[in-house]
Image (spheres, grey):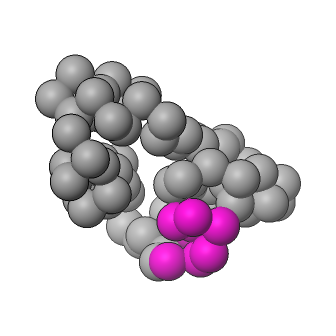
Amino acid sequence: ARRCRAGRRRIPASKTCDVAVMGCVVNGPGESKHANIGISLPGSGENPVAPVYVDGVKAVTLKGDNIAGEFQALIDRYVREHYAAQS
């Protein structure tokens, strides 16, 4: 959310960007598909694996200890690629 708000300040056209951060790998993927970019996070004790959806399509599965940082980088890239030209 913080990345999206920062993008909105830098790139006003990104105000329509929806980011979904879901806490469930069971229901989360379906709900993430309705956002511009969405992630379904693993629960406590589960393997650190998180599918990421971009514009309704599974784009990548993040794995390991840096899921949050990698997802933030994906959001930054999405905002630059989809909204920078509109501002």
Residue 80 x, y percent position in the rendering: 21, 54
Q: Is residue 28 left or right of residue 52?
A: right
Q: Where is residue 75 in the image (x, y as percent from the top left)?
A: 33, 51
Residue drawn at 36 percent across, 37 percent down: 14
Helix, strand or loop: magenta stretch: strand
Q: Residue at x 47, y 77 (%)?
A: 60
Residue at the far front in the pictured view:
86
Residue occupying the point 22% across, 22% down: 9
**Magenta residues?**
49-59
Choose top left, top right, bottom left or bottom right for residue 82. bottom left
- Compared with 75, 61 (above or below) is below
Q: Could you say where residue 44 lies in the image, as x and y percent from the top left?
A: 62, 45
Image side of residue 56 versus residue 2, left or right = right
Q: Which residue is found at the position 54% from the left and 53% from the top?
A: 36
Location of the C terminus (image quadrant): top left
Above-or-below relation of 1 to 52: above
Nearer-the-camera pick, 10 or 76 = 10
Is 37 or 41 nearer to us in this picture? 37
